[in-house]
Amino acid sequence: MLSTNTWTRREMLRYSSLGFGALACSELLAQQPVSTPPLVAPTLRRTAHFKARAQNVILLFMEGAVSQVDSYDPKPYLSKYHGQDPQQTIGPLEKTQFDNIGTVMASPWKVRQWGDSGIHASELFPHINRHMDELCIIRSMTSNFPEHTGANYFFHSGHGQQGRPSMGSWATYGLGTHNRNLPSYVVLNGGRIPSGGLDNFSNGFLPASFQGSLLNAQGTALANIAPNETQGSVQQIKRDLARKLNLELLRRSGPVDALESAIANAELAARMQIAIPNLMDLNRETKDTHTLYGLTSDYEHTRTYGRACLIARRLVESGVRFVEVTIPRIEGIDRWDAHKDISSNHRANALAVDQPIAGLLSDLRRRGLLDQTLVVWSGEFGRTPFAQGGTGRDHNQLGFSLWMAGGGVKKGITYGATDEWGYRATENTLTIHDLHATILSLLGIDHERLVYRFGGRDIRLTDVYGNIISDIIS
Amino acid sequence: MNRSLPILAWFMLTIVSSGHLYADDRSHDFFEQNIRPILATRCFRCHGPEQQKSGLRLDIPEGLRGKGTFGTILVPGDPEKSTLYTALSHQSPKLKMPYQEEPLSTVIVANFKKWIDAGAVWPPKVDANTNDSGFNYNQRVLRLPWIWRKPIKPTLPSIQNSQWPLDPIDYFVYSKLAKADLQPAAEADPASWLRRTYFAITGLPPTQGAIENFIDNESPDRYEQVTDHLLDSPHFGERWARHWMDLVRYSESRGHESDFIIPNAYHYRDYLIRAYNTDLPYDQFIREHLAGDLLPNPRLNPETGANESILATAWPFLGEEVHSPVDIRQDECERLDNKIDVFSKTFFGLTLSCARCHDHKFDAIPQSDYYAMAGFLLSSSYRQVRFETMEANGRIARALQEFEHSYQQKLRRFIVNSFQASLPDIKRYWLAAAKVIKNPSSMEDTIHNQSVNRKQLNRWIDTFKQSRDQPDSPLYLLARAICSDNPAKDTPLQASRDNWLTDLRSPAANATHVIADYSDTHSTPWLTNGFSFGLNPRRVGELSFSPVNTVPVLSIFTYGAAVRNPDWDALSIHQENEVEPGAMASTERSNGMIRTPTVTLRDGLIHYYFSGKAKVYASVASHIMLAGPLHQTLIKELESDEPTWITHDLRDYKGHRVHFEFGPIGSAPCKVLQVIEGPNPLSGRLIANRFPSLVNFQTCQTLEDYASVMHSGYAMALKRFKDQSHPTGKAAKELAGWMHWMLQDPELFCSKLENYRQGVARFHKDYHSHRANRMKDIQLVSRTAVAWLDGNGVNEQMLLRGNYRTPDVIVTRNAPRALQTSLPPDISGSGRLQLADQMTDPDNPLIARVMVNRIWHHLFGNGIVRTVNNFGWLGDRPSHPELLDYLSIVFVEKDHWSVKAMIRRLVMSRTFRMSSNPVNGLANTVDPLNRLLHRMPVKRLEAETIRDSLLAVSGRLDRTLFGVPVPVHLTEFVIGRGRPTESGPLDGEGRRTVYTAVRRNFLPTMLLTFNMPIPFNSIGRRTLTNVPAQSLALMNDKLVYQQARFWAERILTQHVSENTESRIRSMYWTAFGRPADNQEVDLCLKAVTELASSHDCDRNDVRVWTDLCHSLFQANEFIYLR
């Protein structure tokens, strides 16, 4: 448990009446041996286990799986052995999703060195790569699940099936929020919800206040945020009446925490009705910023994703702890899941996300937010160095790449490696649990001490695994 | 090699195996990953705990010590001197292992070499009683003795205030409070009690009329009247079924990537509602959940005659399923884990799934308990069952079988009588035919001298002329002898005679193993879904007729087989029925499916001996879906007019468990004879056309010899056929083959052919009319539901650290050890029925306790044990242990497992009548969590109850029971792959929430906001949050606003002439179940005025009242229950 603070609910309520507007998780504060909490209100900012390098996380989730050998882990062998039988060259292969193994396939993208660090990467992401000296590239990730849904659940929750809390839920459960008017874990829907659905952002068995709140980057941002009433005065009258009736009930019932919390929640809800539309209103941003994020691009999906990235910045600026941005829905392109034609698939996706992500990094840096914001860019696994059938690549969980930037990670480095083919991680092999342990530690949380009692045992995000990747922490 | 190394290694092995010294982890990992799995899958069957062929046992390190029959078994450090290695590497000509199976791959053999080279390290084994993780079984039992022992009848505590209690329950509660110097809360006012009781029992609010009646009722038993009335209401079942649905993670779709449907899952929901409404005793409820498909006398729906019990067995299949798992065994382990978790939490209140990887860290649950339970699940498979018609049609199937049996005797007598007449003459015809064939001109003389019929003689002559060139013909040798000038000197004839019998081949000789053999009645368990294949295989020698309205032909089964009976062709499924998603849809298996026992694939080449047309599904690793790129080869279409060997290549699935399901296609015939695994395609036939036990020509020389042998074979065949003693095995096949031959050519054997033909026609007509008479009652159309189909007994292998790549010893199916039961050893099927009997024995310490505690939890907000799904060490201790024991005993002994009686008991108690206001401030300080029950808690209504209340209050509620789920209303926030194509209506047609579709990945947003659980695991106690999203939902959700409008319209229509104040007072009754006080009325009146002014409209305008109704929905009192 995080805090030895022994505030009572009464004191909390007093605090909330001073304007905080919410009660904290009683079971965290009072250390009661309760398996599931009674009534729980939203989050309170709490103290971390140790010094936090990052205050916030932005996860840029590249669902469908970006090919590592076509992006951040280029391999000359693929050109050298292009067209040959991988069973002969690479050796025995693991079964793949489609099990339609073609020949070794060279990357369609040129490779060059970027920045002062001179890191090799393809030209798939020219905008992002201009920030190469900010990036910490990991080339030795692995996953346990070779198909999307299981891998997505695993990437998000450390467990391959639905039902466990997502890392965003754990982070906010551990740290609470800075912002009183917004949820602490927000998923910005760029248009495409990862396979496995909203359960990827589930609070699992944690209280519902820790679930990822889905905000649409386009259209209505949040369920039930738009008032039914067209006249503000009508809503005000109704809210006042409900509030007074609530106080009447409280008078009848005597002090009851649940009823008091519900009153506070109604107030927070009213504030959210104002805060969220403000947040989504990008007219307050300069023209220069719009251009930076690609909001003026000719390509519709760059504009969509740019909008999501810009809102992500506004969210962390407002103190939201954990933001995940999902990729846009592009007609005829199935996520990054390039089973058929790697070239057209990755080109379409990269065109959508490259400029907005680069813009986000620039913007965070110039506002001084990058140091306290950890940006994580990753898919759920990688792709095979050999073709699936003709020109696609199948799923590969044995080795893939991701990058992080800001928030206390080293800059302009690579860590870990795959074999000559980019097929299996061979050096400093990392698991998703290691990634989780590291993200939590950057936020100041000890992953072994962040536990929740459920179904008879103390459960962690990292289960019984996970090592902090201390080599990449600055 | 260094000579001292083996000695050192031996030393290590000895010490290591006694568990004191650990070699480093890497060598342990190497063993667990590369050696033990191979030993377990390829060696244990013959050299393990059950069998030790040649005295060798390979599942324990001690078994590898010393000398075996062929030399020292293992010399650590020296593979070449280790028999284990030389046998596995096939170096020794004497001994090649695995015995008569495909050799191990070179990689595996190399691993064994590596392992022995490195000293043959065998990691220390954890002992079942005490081990390094500190698991001591006996200590564990003693740690929480109360949960493992039968409840003990407590004495009633004596208390000071004898006025307070209304029921023994109250004594226990009061006594605890008194010990803490606390007073119970005052009695709640009747209206509060009534509202509380309505929600507790039916989940719906009382109407204004009901409340007024109750308050005006001065009868002393008005509490009882209301309680009984509510328990009789059909809405009781809806409310309590939903509680149970949380436990079994009820869903109508399979979640995962595309959220495929679980076809027809809602019958389980309706089953629950009916079970609660009819007050099905809980022990029977559990029996049906564990073995509803196996009960000798299932419960029938009194109205429809449908099998009710079998519906309970849907629960295992309501979990998540992956449509195309890359690693099918890993996926099976995850599915099993979920089922065992649900199983153990729901029925036992224990967390058995902790023991997947290791002995339980805190409870008396060894790891083997987990795998002992897994066996029950693996021994049964998924099916869609025709539950509505199975009982009625089962009776018809049994009657048809009986009729068939009696008719067989009649037909046999008729045949023998028809053929016997020719017996004295027939040899004469053969010898006459011989003469004429050798000397055609002797025809007339022969007819005259031998007094034979010309036509008949010609028939025989023609037959012999043909048969002499047909080595397959039964007459072949006789025909050769007849056509030969001198049989005794005829060398080719003699050669054929000598080879004649050696040509009989058994196809099974070529097999690795026989998976199913329906050609032999007794060897294979008969596992079918429906009755199209009858109640057992057709036996060799059974007679059968051509179908009705065809030329009457009588024939005989020359081989046994599982045969689809066309009588059932007209079966169809109800138009409401949902179809299996993916490729499984193409095989409609509820009309008639036969499955083989479950086996483990060795080589993976499967051969079906089959005729007709069918789709076979190889159900690998108990997988039930085929909807992705992988595993499409598991379905194969079979087609052949004659019994033929068809090969199914499943080599990709070597080492996996599998069973085979044959589903006929359309009305095509389907005969399954054998399913065999073997390295090569098979040849050979099962149909006998040579009859060594009837005719043996070995010593024949002359024509007379041949004819005598043939003749006596003929006589013997008729005699045996007439006798009731039915031969078995080879003799049966020979006899059937002989009779088949005769029935094909009755002209040769019947002296009165016309009589025979007329007889056959008469029987044919009679047979079919008798059957038609029985079959007219077949119920053709049925709905289907998810259910278990029992298979053969399968025991699971223990997995080291829960990892499916490291299997260990086999664990026999059983209940958890601490329940101290054991199944009889001679169980043929899954054993679930026996398990059900043992679990519902009143001596079982957990079943009743866990259920009573759940009922308490739902009524009082907290269980006596608050962790209702975990009675173990990490759960909570009971707040009132004696009370829990008392209730458990009453539940079983007095209430006879009646859930309604138990609810009634609790609701009628003084404890349940307490107000939610504590009697003084002290109580909250001393007992802040209300563990001692100093008052009733304030409870938030559950998600479903909130929605149901909205509908009830607005007047929109449609009280229809049961049926096809109402589709989820899709908002822009209900998104993802597999999203239903059509959105349901906003108000769900006004139906109660329990009838809203439960699509795992597309749950209704508002219900989720109010903590409807995502159905992934057993939930006994819902999380109840209190978050702003809930306020937002009540403020802005379209449904809430729509219902406010309905309510407003209703108020304005029903109370046309009334003034604003009386309308407001009435609304208070409806929404909050109590009268409004004056201050509240004033607040509402003021709001009405303000709203009218804001809208710039009349006070009677519907907009004003919609807003007022909407405000009341937003008030806490609407969703909080005092």
Image (cartoon, coloured by chain):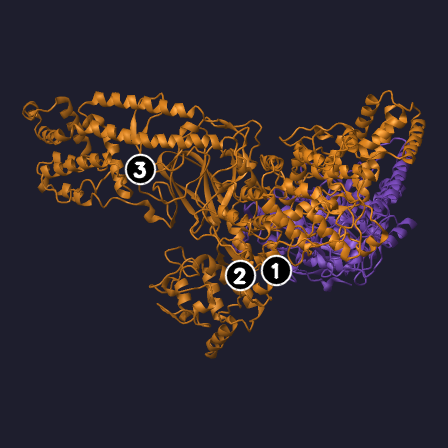
CA separation, marks 3 and 1? 59 Å
Q: Colour of chain B?
A: orange
Label 3 Cα neighbours within 10 Å, binned few <14 / some 14-19 / many ≥20: many
Residue A424: where, in percent of width, then height?
60, 57
Q: Colour of chain A?
A: purple
Please tell me the numbered disc located at residue B33: 2
Image quarter of the N terminus of chain A: bottom right
What's under tag 2, amino acid-wise? Gln
- Whether residue B232 is visible, yes or no, is yes
Residue marked by disc 1: B145
- Whether residue A366 is visible, yes or no, is no
Q: Are marks 3 and 1 on the same chain?
A: yes
Answer left or right for B838 relative to A7. Answer: left
Q: Chain of mark 2?
A: B
Please tell me the numbered disc located at residue B540: 3
Residue A105: where, in percent of width, then height?
59, 49
- Looking at the picture, tell me which residue is in the foreground, B734 or A184: B734
| First in sequence: mark 2 vs mark 3 | 2
